[in-house]
Amino acid sequence: MKRVVVITGAAGGLGGALTTTFRACNWQVAAAGHRAAPTNLPDDVAGLTVELTDAASVERLFAHVEERFGRLDALVHNAGATADNLLSQTAVAAWDQCLAINLRGAFLCAQAAARIMARQQGGHILQIGSFAARGASGQSAYAAAKAGLIGLGESLARELAERNVRVNTIWPGVLPTGMTAGLSPERRLALAQANLLGRWNELEEVARFVAHLAETRNISGQLFQLDSRISRWA
């Protein structure tokens, strides 16, 4: 029987790479999009829809996956959204929405997935975080949400260890996705130069790392940074 993975944010650039890579590694993939299912999926990939900020919608997603496939071996919580702006110009609604998608969504998905994995006595929750958790001018909402993922991941790793559920967080580095498409040439160059190797990361390399990590049995409570910036947290 194939191992089963739920990937949230599957309609985005990294989500697509994760879907392709896990499928190539012989996983059964449930690719979930926020409010809209990913398109142009292979016939053997389940395209699903979830409202990540709504507990009932998240519960329905994971109940459907368990009923359809009979198991859940991994959750890759990849969904995310930015609300970049200076603090003085950040609307309360934008702040709330950013934290709801990035942090509340991660909590709800982890909670639903953990219930299934605990019954199975095994599973792996992988959170896609961000280097922005260290703090960045104009990204207070996004940074706060992604910093919250670190504490969430480490707490869940402690709570779920006795059920053989591993929890890890990945900082994928700067990637060529829709989230970075609108950056100015100057900003793009600055982000590359912040890396010791002078370049951004690649979608395929990140997806390969995540798929490999999902298969490990003895790694939990860790934060993995996948670029060449030096951080006090990674």
Image: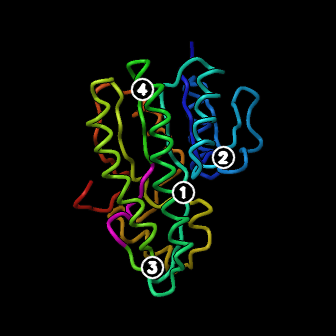
Looking at marks 1 and 2 on the same chain, the residue that comes earlier in the sequence is marked by 2
Question: In the image, 182: left or right of 127?
Answer: right
* Label whose residue precedes the other's in the sequence (2 or 3): 2
Name the quarter where the C terminus is drawn: bottom left
Quarter-wise, where is residue 178 in the image? bottom right
Local secondary structure at mark 2:
strand
Q: Is residue 6 above or below residue 103?
A: above
Look at label 1 and name its amino acid. Answer: Ile
Query: Marks 1 and 2, Cα distance to the nearest angstrom?
Result: 12 Å
- Residue extending farthest top: 1
Residue at mark 3 = 138
Q: Is residue 210 left or right of residue 230?
A: right
> Residue 133 in the image: x percent, y percent?
36, 63
Position of 155 with respect to 192 (left or right) is: left
For mark 4, does the 10 Å Cα neighbourhood hold few (<14), some (14 to 19), or many (20 or more) residues?
many
Protein image colouring: rainbow
Q: Which residues are magenta?
A: 128-135
Q: Residue 184: give x, y in percent of width and height.
A: 56, 79
Spatial separation of the CA atoms under disc 1 and disc 4 = 23 Å
Mark 4 and 3 residues: CB-CB less than 8 Å, in contact?
A: no
- Indicate the amino acid at tag 2: Gly
Residue at mark 1: 101
- Residue under the point 42% across and 54% down: 129
Compute the Cα span from label 4 to label 3: 36 Å
Which residue is tagged 4?
123
Outermost residue, left direction?
232
Question: Mark number for residue 33?
Answer: 2
- Mark 4–mark 2 CB contact (< 8 Å): no
